[in-house]
């Protein structure tokens, strides 16, 4: 596809962004300029779209010039969409935008279905008796605007169910559809962060791997990039408009020329030697990631080399050099888990520069690829504070003292529960999320698969072609319609806390901290929480007359005010907890029991409660506090209901919480799932 | 964007110098009186709830969305509806319910069959209606809609376009019942709440403010509060457009910028707000907050933002930070602005 596309092109009408029209008014073709100037203009154009987010800007640029796909992930309002749409405009490519939602259909993406009927008269003379002519119906596809675009922006791609994405991503990957090759150069996909509470379908690894560039954005304020925060604030306080209108900056032919240069960019020998070493080291890192890493031949054999070349082109270098290895970080956003990704920078830096030099200027070491475009970016740093550098040096060189400030803050923040509760919390979070991800049928949920039509009003909620054929009576049987499912949102947890006299002192303080931590976990998922203290009686701590509620701050107060007294009784609190969970729907219902002793009163085997919990599908988790052997009844309770088993042992003045009994490995796997 | 901060600051000082131009003052005065007319309609029909009324005017002036949460019977819907009725805009009211379908909000699904060369092309589209054609809308009990249908709705609100088509919607006013209670069983995704720049919590006067409640009763008894007839529009598209176009001319002096930054910093650094427990998005706090502060000054007939205008930040943090932090936000605002 030639890049004379800055001028209007026929054929594309709907939804193609207006840039082609805007690009038109320049009457005379401007004189040719060196390619390095065009590259500079492109970089400045993309840079002006957004304050901060240097990694994302560079990633998008690399993807566009390398003609590869880009995946941007981040919280709302951090500029993903501005960047994706803006960059396509700046490039002057014919672009098409799809905003994904739950009901995005294949026809919205690829094009409408076309029914092709061919009537064939039956050979036999008595066809009247057979019910008329035979009709052959073929379903073809009328290519939609996406198949004619050069850059496709897929907004919030993970909002659509994975099943709808599969054909799309295959087509985008192969750049072929309907037996023809597409003009498609790049795709820029944006996605919200998947976390608790966001109704998204995370992309599968195989789908993600098609995106060469993968960058995770963070909010400027939330990631404490105060320098960029201030710049953005100044911008919105000063300028009349809040967002920059993106205009194409490349002249006819320049995009093609830049992309051609990427194809032709030689890879230096030194670079290749270090790239092999880099791959070896990344593989070692990935091995430590425990199967969470996404290391494919496609990524490391083909995509990485294109990114190296593209980075060299953006530097206007004659040959790709070891410094270009820094760009590869932008490929790794989702290929390595975050904690391993942090190590990657050191691996890369180690290979980019000779060791002694790294030590010499280690104090100004620029981590990550943000400043790797190098010379121009760094020279802007020199002015110290108040120069607005084009390459966003604020990422590379934050204002002096920021790091210390953060560390200091870490100390004054509210006291955290003992650090070794983390394992219990992770496992618990894993359990909650596993419950949430259990989908159930729901008419408002995500379309998952097809099932036969049950009610006539479902006619539009499924395969349109079959619906039409059904309506005109030429479909044998009923049309397919979506089976919709949704994850169980919300859920509930009841925390049972032993306040018998043996809990007095340190154990009581510690139990209060565990309760608080558990409430925080539940609060993040907006679960309803019940809190019951128990000794020989159960003491439900209700708020406004309800045991299950979402008044989390009140629970923090209650948890800090427990007064140990009396003996231990399991039956009454468990019975109370299960009773309060009885009415609820969904599988995400949990009871966490904190205790340090054997039950003395009540049914010490709690048989009835164990049966009831199994019947209701409630998980009973138990945490035993103490040095000795854990009462067998606690193990039975957890094992029968699929709950977690933990033990907290006093150790070095603190408490160590670890999985109990023989299923340490089982809970280990839970931890991994949760993290 | 390559000027230095100092240069930008210098420029803003110049701008604030220009801000005193008589034309601008006149225009600001006209905008303020147009909104004052709207305010008096609200006051005539509803007692107290000063914050909600102020915030609704701000939402209308800045074309932002607003979410009002409170128990039943606290005039949420009434004030929202009044605001919409008193503005001469295309109005859409929808009561959401458990089985809300997208088509009810955006218009009917139309199947088109066209004969093309090779056969018959089947095209599904939506005949725009409801939300897609409205300029102002009230979404009552927004949290009752099933989560996923709600997501589509909220995305429309956020992006102000459906598919690739821009929609004329200026302001959406949503109401909901408290989250920490059992009025419904689907908690609203906090990320969705971010779509609403302004977020308020209302309380019943009878439960919280005995004096105001007494006044409420007296004023109803004396017939001072008008329940009927419904108001006639007092502010139209022209006035709203004029006010909106004035917003960028309202100067934001340096102390306000410093205070806003300081406020944000105190949330993040001192109160541990981060991605896991808060939604301090750059768009909301660095772009929309400035716009809202400008509107607050303008509605007051001023052409320069003052530190007191930053009080509106408490309407932006209601559901964006943990509840215990939200409770002390008014203090943080005062401290950040050195008052």
Image: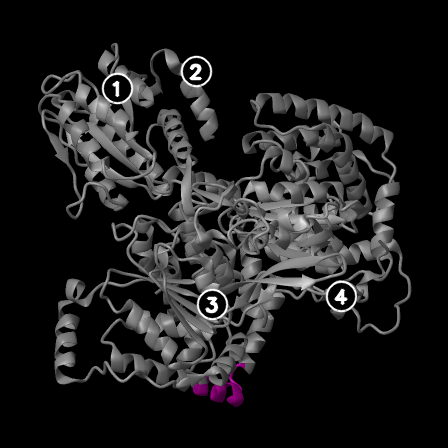
Q: Are marks 3 and 2 on the same chain?
A: no
Answer with mark 2 or mark 4, whichever residue precedes in sequence. Answer: 4
Answer with mark 1 or mark 2, whichever residue precedes in sequence. Answer: 1
Q: Nearer the viewer, residue B334 or A207?
A: A207
Depth check, mark 3 against mark 2: the one in front is 3
SS under mark 4: helix
What chain is tagged by disc 1? A
**Mark seen at residue A665:** 2
**Residue B190 rendering spot, x and y as whole percentages:** 40, 51
Task: Point out the stretch of residues depicted in magenta.
Answer: B19-30
Q: Residue at x 44, y 25 (%)?
A: A671
Residue A93 vs B256, above or below: the answer is: above
Q: Residue at x 47, y 30 (%)?
A: A675
SS under mark 2: helix
Answer with mark 1 or mark 4, whichever residue precedes in sequence. Answer: 4
Q: CA distance from mark 2 to mark 4?
A: 59 Å
Horizontal relation, residue A456 to residue B223: left or right? right
């Amino acid at each position: 596809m030639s890049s004379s596309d800055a001028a209007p092109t026929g054929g594309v009408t709907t939804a193609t962004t207006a840039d082609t029209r805007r690009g038109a008014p320049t009457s005379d073709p401007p004189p040719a300029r060196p390619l390095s100037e065009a590259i500079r203009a492109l970089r400045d154009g993309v840079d002006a779209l957004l304050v901060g987010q240097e990694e994302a800007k560079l990633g998008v640029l690399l993807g566009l010039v390398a003609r590869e796909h880009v995946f941007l992930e981040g919280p709302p309002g951090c500029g993903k969409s501005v960047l994706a749409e803006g960059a396509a405009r700046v490039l002057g490519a014919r672009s098409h935008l799809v905003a994904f939602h739950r009901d995005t259909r294949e026809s919205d993406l690829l094009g409408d279905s076309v029914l092709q009927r061919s009537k064939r008269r039956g050979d036999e003379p008595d066809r009247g008796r057979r019910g008329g002519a035979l009709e052959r119906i073929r379903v073809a596809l009328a290519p939609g605007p996406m198949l004619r675009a050069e850059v496709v922006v897929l907004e919030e791609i993970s909002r659509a169910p994975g099943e709808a994405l599969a054909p799309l991503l295959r087509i985008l990957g192969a750049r072929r559809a309907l037996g023809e090759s597409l003009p498609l150069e790049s795709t820029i996909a944006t996605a919200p962060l998947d976390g608790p509470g966001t109704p998204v379908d995370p992309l599968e690894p195989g789908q993600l791997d098609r995106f060469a560039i993968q960058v995770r954005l963070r909010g400027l304020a939330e990631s404490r990039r105060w320098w960029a925060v201030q710049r953005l604030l100044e911008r919105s306080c000063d300028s009349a408009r809040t967002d920059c209108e993106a205009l194409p900056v490349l002249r006819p032919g320049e995009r093609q020329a830049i992309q051609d240069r990427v194809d032709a960019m030689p890879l230096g020998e030194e670079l290749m030697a270090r790239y092999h070493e880099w791959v070896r080291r990344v593989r070692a890192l990935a091995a430590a990631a425990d199967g969470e890493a996404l290391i494919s031949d496609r990524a490391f054999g083909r995509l990485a080399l294109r990114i190296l070349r593209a980075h060299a082109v953006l530097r206007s270098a004659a040959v790709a050099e070891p410094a270009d290895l820094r760009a590869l970080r932008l490929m790794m956003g989702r290929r390595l888990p975050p904690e391993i990704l942090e190590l990657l920078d050191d691996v890369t830096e180690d290979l980019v520069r000779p060791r002694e030099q790294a030590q010499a200027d280690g104090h100004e070491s620029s981590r990550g690829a943000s400043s790797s475009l190098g010379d121009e970016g760094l020279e802007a740093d020199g002015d110290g504070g108040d120069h607005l550098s084009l390459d966003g040096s604020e990422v590379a060189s934050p204002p002096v003292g920021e790091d210390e400030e953060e560390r200091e803050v870490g100390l004054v923040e509210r006291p955290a529960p003992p650090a070794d509760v983390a394992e219990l919390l992770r496992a618990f979070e894993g359990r909650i999320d596993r419950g949430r991800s259990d989908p159930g049928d729901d008419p408002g949920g995500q379309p998952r698969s097809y099932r036969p039509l049950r009610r006539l009003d479902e006619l539009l909620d499924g395969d349109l072609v079959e619906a039409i054929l059904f309506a005109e009576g030429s479909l044998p049987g009923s049309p397919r319609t979506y089976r919709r499912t949704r994850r169980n949102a919300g859920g509930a947890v009841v925390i049972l806390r032993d306040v018998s006299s043996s809990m007095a002192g340190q154990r009581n303080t510690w139990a209060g901290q565990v309760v608080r931590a558990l409430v925080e976990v539940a609060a993040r998922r907006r679960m309803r929480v019940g809190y019951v203290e128990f000794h020989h009686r159960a003491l439900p701590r209700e708020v406004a007359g309800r045991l299950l509620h979402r008044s989390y701050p009140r629970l923090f107060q209650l948890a800090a005010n427990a007064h140990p007294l009396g003996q231990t009784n399991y039956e009454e609190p468990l019975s109370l907890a299960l009773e309060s969970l009885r009415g609820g729907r969904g599988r995400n219902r949990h009871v966490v029991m904190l205790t340090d002793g054997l039950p003395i009163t009540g049914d010490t085997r709690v048989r009835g409660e164990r049966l009831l919990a199994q019947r209701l599908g409630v998980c009973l988790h138990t945490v035993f506090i103490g040095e000795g052997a854990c009462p067998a009844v606690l193990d039975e309770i957890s094992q029968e209901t699929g709950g977690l088993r933990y033990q907290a042992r006093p150790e070095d003045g603190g408490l160590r919480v670890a999985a109990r009994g023989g299923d340490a490995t089982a809970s280990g796997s839970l931890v991994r799932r949760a993290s | 964007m390559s000027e230095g901060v100092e240069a930008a600051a210098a420029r803003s000082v110049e701008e604030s110098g220009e801000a005193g131009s008589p034309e601008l003052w006149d225009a600001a005065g006209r905008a303020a009186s147009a909104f004052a007319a709207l305010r008096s309609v609200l006051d005539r029909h509803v007692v107290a709830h000063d914050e909600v009324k102020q915030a609704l005017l701000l939402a209308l002036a800045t074309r932002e969305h607003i979410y009002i949460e409170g128990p039943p019977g606290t005039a949420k819907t009434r004030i929202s509806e009044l605001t919409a009725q008193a503005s001469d805009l295309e109005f859409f009211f929808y009561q959401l319910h458990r089985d809300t379908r997208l088509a009810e909000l955006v218009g009917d699904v139309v199947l088109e069959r066209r004969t093309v060369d090779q056969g018959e092309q089947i095209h599904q589209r939506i005949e725009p209606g409801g939300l897609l054609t409205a300029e102002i809308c009230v979404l009552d009990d927004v949290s009752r809609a099933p989560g996923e249908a709600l997501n589509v709705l909220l995305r429309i609100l956020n992006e102000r376009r459906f598919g690739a088509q821009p929609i004329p919607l200026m302001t959406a006013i949503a109401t909901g019942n408290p989250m920490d209670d059992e009025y419904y069983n689907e908690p609203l995704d906090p990320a969705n709440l971010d779509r609403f720049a302004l977020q308020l919590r209302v309380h019943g006067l009878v439960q919280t403010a005995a004096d105001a409640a007494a006044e409420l009763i007296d004023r109803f008894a004396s017939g001072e509060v008008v329940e009927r007839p419904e108001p006639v529009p007092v502010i139209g598209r022209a006035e709203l457009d004029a006010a909106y176009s004035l917003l960028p001319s309202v100067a934001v002096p340096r102390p306000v910028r410093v205070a806003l930054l300081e406020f944000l910093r105190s949330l993040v650094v001192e109160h541990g707000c981060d991605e896991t427990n808060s939604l301090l998005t750059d768009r909301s706090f660095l772009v929309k907050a400035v716009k809202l502060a400008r509107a607050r000054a303008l509605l007051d007939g001023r052409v320069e933002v003052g530190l007191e205008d930053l009080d509106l930040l408490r309407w932006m943090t209601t559901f964006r930070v943990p509840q215990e932090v939200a409770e002390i936000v008014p203090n943080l605002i005062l401290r950040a602005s050195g008052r």
